Amino acid sequence: MTKHRELTGVNRGYEPGASAGLTLLELMVALCVFLILGSAAVMLVRSHVALYPSQQGQAALNIQLRNSIAQMQIDVMNAGVDYYPGVNAPGAPIGLTIQNQTNTNCFNSATRIYEASCFDTLTILAFDSIPPARPTETYDITSVNRMTLVPANATTTTAAQLAAAYKKNSELLLITGSISPDTGTPKFMTVYLSEDAVVDGSTVTIAWTPGDIVKATNLPDPSGTYTGYYNKNERYALATYPPGGYPAMTTTSTFDTTAVVLKLSPIVYWVKTTDPHNPQLVRTEKQQDAVIADSIVGFKVGAMTWGGSQSSAAGDESPTYLYDPNSYKPPYDFSLIRSVRISLIGRTAINPTSNFVNSFDGGHYRVEAVSAVVSPRNLSMHDQ
């Protein structure tokens, strides 16, 4: 008989190589490492969450600035083009005007507010789609305030169509049918309608308030410019009557049956500061405002003119962009413009809790800038 020994409950002691688990010290070390890595991950996520809106705001700002500058490039390139069907007479009238601001104290560093005097205004000559008309007789528009017109091409346009387009407050451009020997281009003038046009058979009668025209007044002015009068909204009048006036030889008040009458629809770029904390770039066409960019802190337009070289410190002359029409030779002669430099600066939303401070104006926001150089084709066709 074999005898079996019961080993149940017998302490067999420690066996080398057997797993003994974690000690309390090891568990505490592991827990500390986990907490350190976990908190680092949480902090990294939190920092990226705060950065995300900033990145999105900067990307959106960049896109709207580029879109805005692209639209201005298209408009400036075509300034004054196709205003006279079948005939291209560059320089009469000019294709664009620039109203520069020279105020250097327009920014409040405490409130981060940019005033309206910080921004330039760019006005581009454009025209309505209605075909041109012609006077039925010779008129001196400084001595009368009514004119009878007929369609320039009666086979394609009716008097009723003209009258439908010539509404009160419309601005009309009158261009002579002959070329001035002084300038090699036609002369022009504008009127601002005081009432809707009236149809009378095959003719249309337009009217304006006496004085609501550009009146050339030759003055003993060494710069050779003249002053004029235009008591309407300056923003829309800038297309054909810029601040400072024009060289007197480019305008006239007499128009005969060979003259052409066109309805203006100028395009104006300006900055709206109704909300001082959010200046907006506005594109105005047909007197309708469209906001194309928000948070604008800089809008400057410079012009390089024909014969506008400036003397440098070394004594030589080199072309440069001018930011004051009074610097043109002669002053305020916008027909001399051959190239336009447009600079646009915008900012993201103000974040006073951010530690970031930009180097442009010291604000707690990002700043983006874009610029473009554009050559108005209609103003350079006589240079060759």
Image (spheres, rainbow, N blue to C red):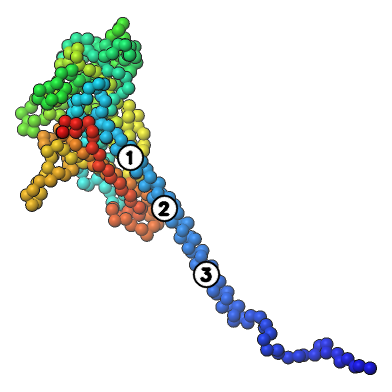
What separation in Å lies between label 3 and label 1 (alpha carbons)? 48 Å
Q: Quadrant of the C terminus?
A: top left
- Residue 41 image position (x, y, % from top left): 51, 65
Residue 75: percent from the left, percent from the top? 29, 34
Q: Along the polypeptide, which appears first: circle 3 or circle 1?
A: 3
In percent of the image, x 37 and y 43: which residue is there?
Answer: 64
> Few, some or many C-alpha atoms within 10 Å of disc 3 (few <14, some 14-19, many ≥20)?
few
| Residue sitting nearer the eye, 196 or 179 | 179
Residue lying furthest top: 201
Residue 55, disc: 2
**Is 292 positioned to the left or the right of 224 in the image?**
right
Up-down relation of residue 1 to residue 201 (above or below): below
Mark 3 and mark 1 residues within 8 Å of each other at the beta carbon: no
- SS assignment at label 3: helix
Front in this rendered view, residue 86 or 235 = 86
Give amino acid for label 1: Ala
Question: Within the image, what quadrant is residue 148 found in?
Answer: top left
Q: Amino acid at mark 2?
A: Gln
The amino acid beneath tag 3 is Leu
* Quadrant in the rendering for residue 279: top left
Q: Sequence order check: which comes first, mark 1 or mark 2?
A: 2
The disc, 2 or 3, on the residue closer to the chain's N-terminal end is 3
Instruction: Report whether 44 appears left or right of 248.
Output: right
* Label 3 sits on residue: 37
Q: CA distance from mark 2 to mark 3?
A: 26 Å
Q: Residues within 10 Å of mark 1 (few under 14, many from 20)?
A: few
Nearer the viewer's eye, disc 3 or disc 1?
1
* Residue at which label 1 appears: 70
With respect to residue 224, does 25 lie above or below? below
Is residue 40 something that shows in the picture? yes
Q: Secondary structure at mark 1?
A: helix
The disc label shown at residue 178, or none:
none
